[in-house]
Amino acid sequence: MRPRIFRNFGIKVLSIGLAALLWGAVAGQREAERSLRVPLEYRNIPPELELLGEPASLVDVRVRGSSGVLGELRGADLVAVLDLRTARPGRRLFHLLPGDIAVPAGVKVLQATPSTLSLTFEASAVRTVPVVPDLDGDPAAGFIVGRVTTVPATVDVVGPVSAVQKITEATTEPVDITGATGPVRDTVTIGLPDSIARLRNPHSGMVTVEIAPAPVERTLAGVPVGLRGLAAGRRATLMPAQVTATVRGAGAAVSGLTITSLELYADLSGLIPGRYNLPVRYQSFTDVTITRVEPANLDVAIR
C-alpha cells in the first residue's frame, strides 16, 4: 500500500507550485507611495448652523501600498469625510486625520493636505417673503397690464441670518406678455437669484397676468350742476351753473357718456341764507372716474 503522502501527489505538487507563484508575484511587488486628489465630504452639520463661503471640495492625500494596488487606484476610489458635529458660530478649525479617509484594503494613508481646514459658520434663519413675478415685454397697443397674481403668493427662505435679513422678495422666471390682448398664464420656477440663501422647499408657481383695454380720457363741457340739501322754502343760485368735467375709464363706457350722465352737484345741507364757495361733488361710477372738474368750486347764494 502506498503511503498517504503520495496520495493525490500530482494535485499536491500543482497546489504547491501555484502557491509559490502567487507568493513570488506578491513578494515581487515593492511598496510605493502615491498622491491622489480625493473628494471631501462634510457631514453632521448642526441643523441650526450654515456653512459659509465655498469650502474645499477636494484634498490631496498621500498613500502607501503595493505598486500593483496603487497603480489601479483612482481618486474617486477614496473619500475624505470631515465630521462637523462640534461646529459653533464663527470661524472654526478642523483637523483632517488619516483615519478620516476611507481607503481600500492594503492601502495606508500617510498624510492629507490640507491637514487643517478653516471653516466659518453662521446661525440659520427662516423668513417668509412675497413672490414677485418678472414680466417680460408689453401688451398689444391699446392694452395695459391689470392684476397680477402668483400661486403660491409667498415662500419660505432659509439660509445664513445675514443673508436672509436682506431678502425682501422671491422672483420668478420671466413671463412673456408681448403683444397680449387677454389673460396670460404660465407655470414658472420661483427662486432667489444671486443669493446664498435658498428656498426651504423648491417651488414652481402659476402666474396669472390680467390684460385689459387701456383707459381713455374724455372732456365734457357744459355739464349742469344740481343742488342737494336745500332747506324747504329757500332758493339758491349757482355761479357758474355748468362746469367742464374730464373723465377716464374703459373706452366703451366713456364714449357712451353724455353731459346728463354725470351727476354733479353742490351740497347745501345745513346751510343758512348767505353766500358760499362750495366744491363740486359727483357720483361714483363703476367703469368711469371723474379726474378733473373746472371750476372745482362754485359761488352759491342762498336766500
Image: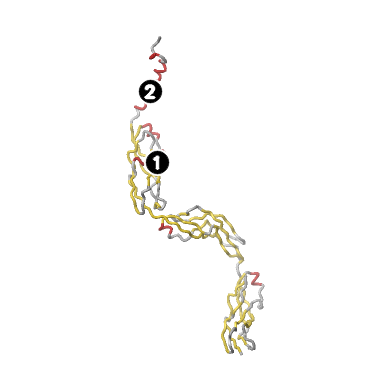
The residue positioned 36% from the left and 25% from the top of the image is 23
Q: Position of residue 98 (x, y in %)?
A: 34, 40
Q: Amino acid at mark 2?
A: Ala
> Mark 2 or mark 1, which has the lower sequence index?
2
Classify 132 as above or below 42: below
Left or right: residue 200 versus residue 186 is left
- What is the C-alpha distance between the residues marked 2 and 1? 34 Å
**Residues packed near mark 2 inside 10 Å, few (<14), some (14 to 19) or many (20 plus):** few
**Residues packed near mark 1 inside 10 Å, few (<14), some (14 to 19) or many (20 plus):** some
Q: Which residue is mark 2?
A: 19
Q: Nearer the viewer, residue 111 or 8?
A: 8
Q: Which mark is residue 79?
A: 1
Q: Nearer the viewer, residue 262 or 68?
A: 262
* Count of all numbered marks drawn on residues in the image: 2
The image quadrant of residue 59 is: top left
Label 1: element kind: strand
Label 2: element kind: helix
